[in-house]
Image (cartoon, grey):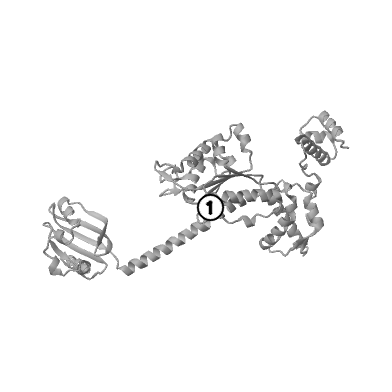
Amino acid sequence: MEAVLLVSDLLMENSSISAMVVNHAGLVIFINPTYLNILGKTEDEVVGKFIGDITPDTRTLFVLRTGKAIVGYNWTIGGYKMIACALPLIKNGKVIACFAYSLFMDIWDAKDLAENLMCELNMYKDEVRNLYSSRYTFKDIIGDAQAIRNVKFLAQQAARHSSTTVLITGESGTGKELFAHSIHNCSSRYNFPFVRVNCAAIPENLLESELFGYVEGAFTGARKGGNPGKFELANGGTVFLDEIGEMSFAMQGKLLVVLQEKEFERLGSNQPIRVNVRVIAATNRDLEDMVEQNRFREDLYYRLNVIRLEIPPLRQRLEDMPLLIRYLIPKLNVKLRTSVIDINEDAVKQLLKYSWPGNIRELENILERAMILADVERSNSIDTKHLLFMKGKLSYNCAPFTSTLKTSMEEIEKQLIAKAMEDNGYDKALAAKALDIDLSWLYKKLKKHGIQ
């Protein structure tokens, strides 16, 4: 009895809970002051009265009739939105009453809650934006050579068409990812996520779940509650599929469906998820050649190859070398905490003799090494002596592009044979073995190229 009185007292005094009890006939036999305030009535106007006349939408009559509780439903009354429960009170197997209560806050608490929720939501949005955001713009693409200006102009036009798929091709180190970031940042999708997926770095058996997500229990080790995929995370923004030429044939088919239908299913689910994303793909492989060899789907290739950007290698725009060096040195000074501010003309000329198979990424690495050597000598300028480590590369540089493939290949052959001879002390037998050719064939090649 004391426990019942204690509960009654709590309900009478607690202003955050509205409560009442309705007997088996539907008459109100108890109501607390909080509920009376919401109704705008006195106790005499409610107690002993039929609940249907007081709150026509009441759930208590259903509970009295069926004996089933209704828990956690939305209840709006007197301008207040609350979460309500209606519970049957049973004695000797019979429903004798219904206990109904609602949890609510006054309007100022609700306002505070909304503001707190918005702050928290914005915090999470900022986190996602920082995690999946593009870092570069077209201003970060350095170069005045006509080749790079042409591709930059085409990329800017592609950015204006925010739903068009873009395929970026080019050798490693040419800046394909830089272009992908810039296109996203210059498009109408710039406020939405930019999500990068390196298709070569993710194991084949994990790529599908990485792209499309999975539900709980989809496979052994699946995270509780499931996990969204990159396409889901990028909704409204851009998915950048780097090294797409490394994607398996089976996975290519699944990607094609997403590009066509704009929807997918999480691994282990049959519920389709619609997304609005732009796809930018990049590769250093020859996809046309892969299509001919049946290693890349032709239909996917045409779906990706709507706008194609071919990024020129550094050797085809060597006139940009001074610009690139001036851009990279201050950037590397920050990274290395050095104070190198210049590079002399002879050092630049030496760099111009190299063909740069690793392109701008290789240039950055070589400048970094040269700057460290200059800093050790407390020099604020890169000199030719700081590039001595490149001597081997410069002695046997790749052949420059000529008018025909045949002459270019012959020049490369000559350089490789000359290097093999030098590396093996001009021992023809050892050089032939290193080149994996017959000794008689080496003699013919030495004579043909005039190598002493």
- Count of marks overlaid on the render: 1
The answer to which of 218 and 255 lies nearer the viewer is 255
Q: Is residue 297 in view?
A: no
> What residue is drawn where x is 28% and y is 62%?
81
**Circle 1: is it few (<14), some (14-19), or many (20+) Cα within 10 Å?**
many
In percent of width and height, residue 332 lies at: 68, 60
- Which quadrant: the C terminus? top right
Q: Residue furthest right?
A: 452
Apparent side of residue 301 relative to residue 402 in the rendered image (left or right): left
Q: Is residue 280 in view?
A: yes
* Local secondary structure at mark 1: strand
The answer to which of 450 and 223 lies nearer the viewer is 450
Apparent side of residue 434 relative to residue 221 in the rendered image (left or right): right
Apparent side of residue 446 relative to residue 188 in the rendered image (left or right): right
In the image, residue 243 sits, relative to residue 133, either above or below, namely above
> What residue is drawn where x is 43% and y is 62%?
120
In the image, residue 379 sits, relative to residue 169, either above or below, namely below
Q: Which residue was labeled with disc 1? A: 194
The answer to which of 115 and 404 lies nearer the viewer is 404
In percent of width and height, residue 297 lies at: 55, 35
The answer to which of 306 and 133 lies nearer the viewer is 306
In percent of width and height, residue 101 lies at: 22, 61
In percent of width and height, residue 369 lies at: 73, 56
- Which quadrant: the N terminus? bottom left
- Callout 1 amino acid: Phe
